[in-house]
Amino acid sequence: MHEQSDKSYRELANEALGDERLHSAIRMIQDRIGKGTRHLWKTEISQELRDKAKKARMRTLDNLDKVLTTLTEKIRANGGHVYFAKTAEDARNYCLKVAQKNEVKRVVKGKSMTSAEIGVDHLLEAHDIEVVETDLGEFIIQLAHDAPSHIIAPCIHMDKQQIGRLFEKELGIPYSEDPPTLTKAARKALREKLLSADMGISGCNLACAETGHISLVSNEGNIRMSTTMPKVHVALMGMERVIATLAEHDMLLRLLTRGAAAQKISTYVSFLGGPRQPGEPDGPEEFHLVIIDNGRMKMLADPRFREVLSCIRCGSCLNICPVYGRIGGHAYNAPYPGPIGAVVMPLFNGVNKHADLCRGESLCGACKDICPVNNDLPRMLSELRHMLAYGDEQWDVAPVDKGEALAFKGWYAAMSSRTAYNLLVKTGRLAQAPFVSDGMLKKGIGPLGKWTADRDFPPIARQTFGERWKTVHAPRLKGDSNE
């Protein structure tokens, strides 16, 4: 199991900025999937449908207690078990309890970001239970003792040569960089694990309260085998992933696959809602759905951040983000990278602890444009920055830089007064003079120095627009009028 890095966001980001192989890999996914998704939004999926999906998500969140109650009743009526976990620790302990009760020795996992969020692998392995990732990308990451760098493409930072050397060392096969050969080797290794596993753990892409089922999408078939071959299946679900009706579920599923991989539908879509029924040839003997809070109720109660719970975790925001494109996923050092991670990780684990994540994003708005449900991540990033600048009692946030907050208050005061603004401009012109060369500021001091360390900065103009108007345009217009 991979440990989080001890390095800071800035250190990891600086390392990634010099990694051209990483940039090339991310360019590939952003050019193919990111642009492909945007094309689908323009040609196939109307803005009205995305707006409708967003309203459905927010309506479900407004009635989350009732919708979850309906889902729970349906699952239990079908013979399944439902457990509500207040914290990540509660969810981990429940998984261990189920595993110990069934004398589990080996767990196979379908791809699950929620399992990484709660850190269940550590606890199971500490109790001598083998945990095997079955998603090909996650399997590679696990063999490499590395960490995922993308929500849907966890090993995007590795090339086929690296994977070939890894398989040669860990699987004992001759070196190859032929993708079909490598895939075949992984399939053989994973089939042996799947056939002897006692328990499967999966995530939950969506759940439908009306029918009492969860939905899982994949392109490899591993999730279906992980959830149906072992005798026990535990599904981990963030409490916000539920949808009220089957019609809304269908609409969001189609948006999910298009946002995640620019696909109209994934190769495999599995619907699960309980244990194997009498007469059915396959399926688990026990089915457990763990519905996890872990801070989501607090987000739900805050109108500033309730919207983030409408996210369907497609990862499309990573496929368009210019910041992610330069620093990759490891710089976030968290289970959820990219713009969505920059919002949810501070809310999950502490805004001050993850201050650099929300301060590192560009606020360009590309993530909002591509989001299937129009999540306004830039607005929420700005809310987090405001909390960091001025503090926030509700989220126990301490101001990170009182000097910065004071500077912005001063800027606000200057922009509100013509006299103060004019004085600030004149003072700035005088102060910048020693640093201007060839028409650009080559070296700054204080916070500006961080900018000019890598690039030049345009100096304050010799005349403001108002001054130019008075000296150039107004006399000309007056002359025209006299004529």
Image (spheres, helix red, strand yellow):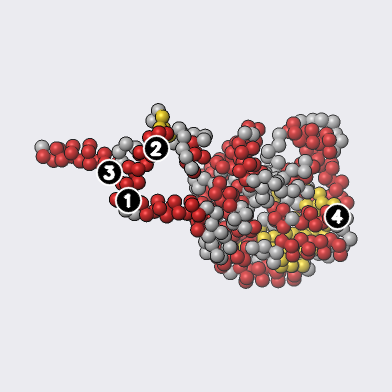
Does residue 160 sit above or below 268 in this rendering?
above
Residue 85 in the image, given as x and y percentages of width and height: 71, 66
Q: Residues within 10 Å of mark 4 (few under 14, many from 20)?
A: some
Q: Label 2, label 3: how many angstroms apart (C-alpha)?
A: 21 Å
Residue type for callout 1: Ala
Query: Which residue is at the front of the view, 433 or 400?
Result: 433
Residue type for callout 2: Gln
Residue type for callout 3: Gly
Tell me the number on the disc at residue 129.
4
Tell me the number on the disc at residue 432.
2
Q: In the displayed structure, does residue 422 sit left or right of residue 269?
A: left
The structure residue drawn at horizontal position 53% and vertical position 60%, both measured from the top left corner, is 391
Mark closer to the chain start, 3 or 1: 1
Q: Label 4, label 2: how many angstroms apart (C-alpha)?
A: 64 Å
Q: Label 1, label 4: how many angstroms apart (C-alpha)?
A: 68 Å
The structure residue drawn at horizontal position 35% and vertical position 46%, both measured from the top left corner, is 424
Mark closer to the chain start, 1 or 2: 1
Q: In the displayed structure, does residue 118 sit left or right of residue 439?
A: right
Residue 196 in the image, given as x and y percentages of width and height: 88, 51
- For disc 3, the marked residue is 466
Mark closer to the chain start, 2 or 3: 2
Q: Are marks 2 and 3 in contact (CB under 8 Å)?
A: no
- For disc 1, the marked residue is 420
The structure residue drawn at horizontal position 78% and vertical position 64%, both measured from the top left corner, is 94
Residue 227: in sight, yes or no?
no
Residue 312 in the image, given as x and y percentages of width and height: 61, 55
Q: Label 1, label 2: how many angstroms apart (C-alpha)?
A: 18 Å
Report helix, strand or loop for mark 4: loop
Q: Are marks 4 and 2 in contact (CB under 8 Å)?
A: no
